[in-house]
Every structure is written in structure tokens, then in C-alpha cells.
Amino acid sequence: MLRDIVILIFRFTAYVLIQVLVLNNIQFSGYINPYPYILFVLTLPLWISPNLVLLLSFVLGLTIDVFSGTLGLHTFASVFTGFIRQGLLSLLKPNNDYKSEEISLQNLGFQWFLVYLSIGIFIHHLVLFTIESLSFTGFFHTLQVTVISAFFSIIIAFIFELFRIKSKQENILE
């Protein structure tokens, strides 16, 4: 249990640092804004209570907001994603139930993980960019930015997940 907590702290820190120091500085013509840090919330183990998921989502979003100068945007989108996570997991539950407490590409397979990750990241980005625009008048522009940014976030999140699998196989921190 202590090992799992240390791994979660390491992943939280790594995702925040990568987001804040690298990915926040990548923006192409206002359309590509990758935010794969939400992978932390989406891949929290099943043994974590829904209330703790919401608290961790809040802390993650607030941390990103503080370092990005966007107080509230990432916090709200992260908490919303943490809130819908349990429903999404129930909706996408495999026929043979979850064999492991860990939500990962390795445990649940490529197709399941891709669908789960795509829906979770798309919803997070839609909420984030809708709040950022503060209106529905530019809905199609917001939708376009959401789709493009979500696509790149999914690719980056998959790269993160592949590193997690590799580190697990090498017995380094997950």
C-alpha cells in the first residue's frame, strides 16, 4: 500500500512537471493545447474511493492552474473528469469485470484503453475549452480546438502509458 502511494505521488509530480515545464509551452496557432496530465485522474487505481478521486482531481487541477496562471479552469475540468470517471468505468466495464485494481493499457488492452482514454480526455478538454471561451457562440471553434487538442493529448498520454509499462517491466517506479 505504501509503495502504491509513493508511485501515485511520483506520477502526480511527473505529470505536473511535464505539463507545466514542457507542454504548456507548446501551442500551435491556438489550436493544439495538449493537456495529458488528466491521465493521472483517469488511471487512478480502483481501490481509491470516489471522494478521494475528487480530492486528488482538485489538487491536480489547482496545481496546474497555479503554475499556468489560469486559476479555476483546470481545477473545474479536472474535478468534473474525476466526477464522471466512475460512471465512465461502469459504462465501459468489461464483461468479465475488472481483473485488476489498476487502470492501465497493459491490464485492459489497447481497444478498451483507447476508448476509455479518448472519452475521458475529450470530455475534460471540452469542459476546459468551453469554460475558457465563456460562451457557446464560438461553439464550433471550441469543438475544433477540443478535438485537435484531445487528439494530441491522447497520443501523448499513450506515450506516458507506454513508459509506465516499460518502467513496470524494469521494476522501476510505475
Image (cartoon, grey):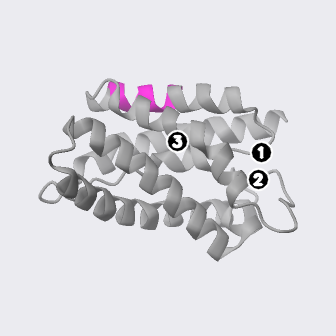
Looking at the image, which residue is at 78% across and 66% down?
A: 94
Q: Is residue 4 above or below residue 23?
A: above
The residue mark sitting in front, 2 or 3, is 3
Q: Which residue is pictured at 69% across the width and 53% down the height?
A: 89
Name the residue beneath numbered marker 2. 102
Q: Nearer the viewer, residue 164 or 61?
A: 61
Work out how far the residue at label 1 is from the one at label 3, CA to CA, in angstroms.
15 Å
> Quick check: is 125 in the magenta stretch?
no
Whole-Å distance between the Cαs marked 2 and 1? 6 Å
Mark 3 — residue?
81
Disc 2/disc 3 C-alpha distance (Å): 18 Å
- Mark 1 is on which residue type? Leu
Disc 3 crowd rating (10 Å Cα; few below 14, some 14-19, many 20+) is many
Task: Assign a secondary structure to mark 3.
Answer: helix
The correct choice, above or below, for 131 with respect to 121 in the image is above
First along the sequence among labels 1 and 3: 1
What is the span of residues highlighted in magenta in the rendered image?
A: 59-66
Q: Magenta segment, principal secondary structure?
A: helix
Residue at 23 percent across and 52 percent down: it is: 142
Is 64 in the magenta?
yes
Q: Secondary structure at mark 2?
A: loop
Q: Which residue is mark 1?
A: 46
Is residue 32 visible to us here? Answer: no
How many residues crowd mark 2 within 10 Å: few (<14), some (14–19), many (20+)?
Answer: some
